[in-house]
Image (cartoon, grey):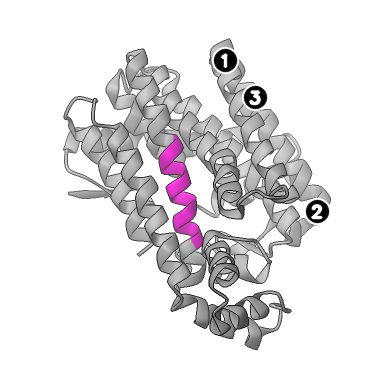
Amino acid sequence: MTVVGPFGLSVRDQALEADVQTGLAAVEAGLLDATKSEVPFITEAAQHLVRAGGKRFRPLLVMLAAQFGDPYAPGVVPSAVVVELTHLATLYHDDVMDEAEVRRGVPSANVRWGNSVAVLTGDFLFARASHILADLGPEAVRIQAEAFERLVTGQILETAGPRDGRDPVDHYLDVLAGKTGSLVAVSGRFGAMMSGADESVVDILTQYGERLGTAFQLADDVLDIASDSHESGKTPGTDLREGIPTLPVLHLRAQAAQYGRPEDLELVALLDGDLTDDARHAETLRRLRVHPALEQARRDTVRYAEEARSTLAPLPECYAKSALEELCDAVVHRAG
């Protein structure tokens, strides 16, 4: 059993391990190459988050999905570079929108160079991803465009908030399906498609990625509150401090509205206060960590991970399928 990549997936087959490691190394080289510019400052800004590291969750999924066809097919690695570049670009934009100060343990681009440079660097990464896509064919361009539309729609829905009468939790899950699930779904789809896998396999791995992506983000929501370390790549309680309505908070608000328990109402009042105050933030975090809403969010994470696992059932038994199943376990483990 060997641990592969920063995400910590355990692989039980030497040939699969070698394929995945080789693929991820090629993706890393591809990312550095794609973020080079004739202008040194642009290279520095574009490689800021590449060099900061990351889980490379999406490229890992591309590599595993490619095992159901020809994992050495020429489009596999470039498609993995595309999905990771797209993901990185969204991080630059997200940090501007959220006024985040830290990303992956380093100062965010907007803190280091300002909002304008951060936004334009994200645009530069989108452009480079599109350039690579053009060589992968019109179908790949269409798939990426549709995913990007969903991603942006999810971000807009998050910014706008739920319409009157809409359950905030349902709205939030729709947001996550767009913001996160769409690109993870493309990762599974590209890996299978570029490797020449059967269309039925491509469909299965697309559905798998959609559900796993949502579970992955929900695990981040739980980690933001439950973690005492930097497991999520951000300081614990960052989303809380920035007023981002994650699933545990939404469950808390729903319970407070439904049952009116004094302790729930007190916690909601803390959330609605100034969480830039360190003492108030610490007290809110402490209370949320022992609140049933956090456990409810964990159960939701498990549910989406299990749905992802169940979609794999029709696939033939092999080491790659086992690794995809273990990815479901890894996501749940992150959420405790």
In depth, the one of 318 and 314 nearer the eye is: 314
Label ID, residue 135:
1
Question: Is 175 part of what is drawn in magenta?
Answer: no
Label ID, residue 115:
2
Residue 290 screen position, x and y as percent: 43, 79
Q: Residue furthest front?
A: 259
Kind of residue sitting beneath label 3: Ser
Asked if labels 2 and 1 touch by Cβ distance under 8 angstroms, the answer is no
Q: What's the distance in space between the residues labelled 2 and 3, CA to CA? A: 23 Å
Above-or-below relation of 263 to 64: below
In depth, the one of 264 and 70 nearer the eye is: 264
Displayed quadrant of residue 277? bottom right
Label ID, residue 130:
3
In depth, the one of 145 and 15 nearer the eye is: 145
Kind of residue sitting beneath label 1: Asp
Q: Residue at x 53, y 35 (%)?
A: 183
Q: Residue furthest top?
A: 138
Residue 313 screen position, x and y as percent: 23, 31
Q: Residue at x 58, y 37 (%)?
A: 85
The answer to whether residue 196 is left or right of residue 294 is left
Q: Which residues, given as a range, are shown in magenta?
A: 210-221
Secondary structure type for disc 3: helix
Q: Residue at x 46, y 76 (%)?
A: 291
Q: What's the distance in space between the residues labelled 1 and 3, CA to CA? A: 9 Å
Q: Residue furthest bottom?
A: 279
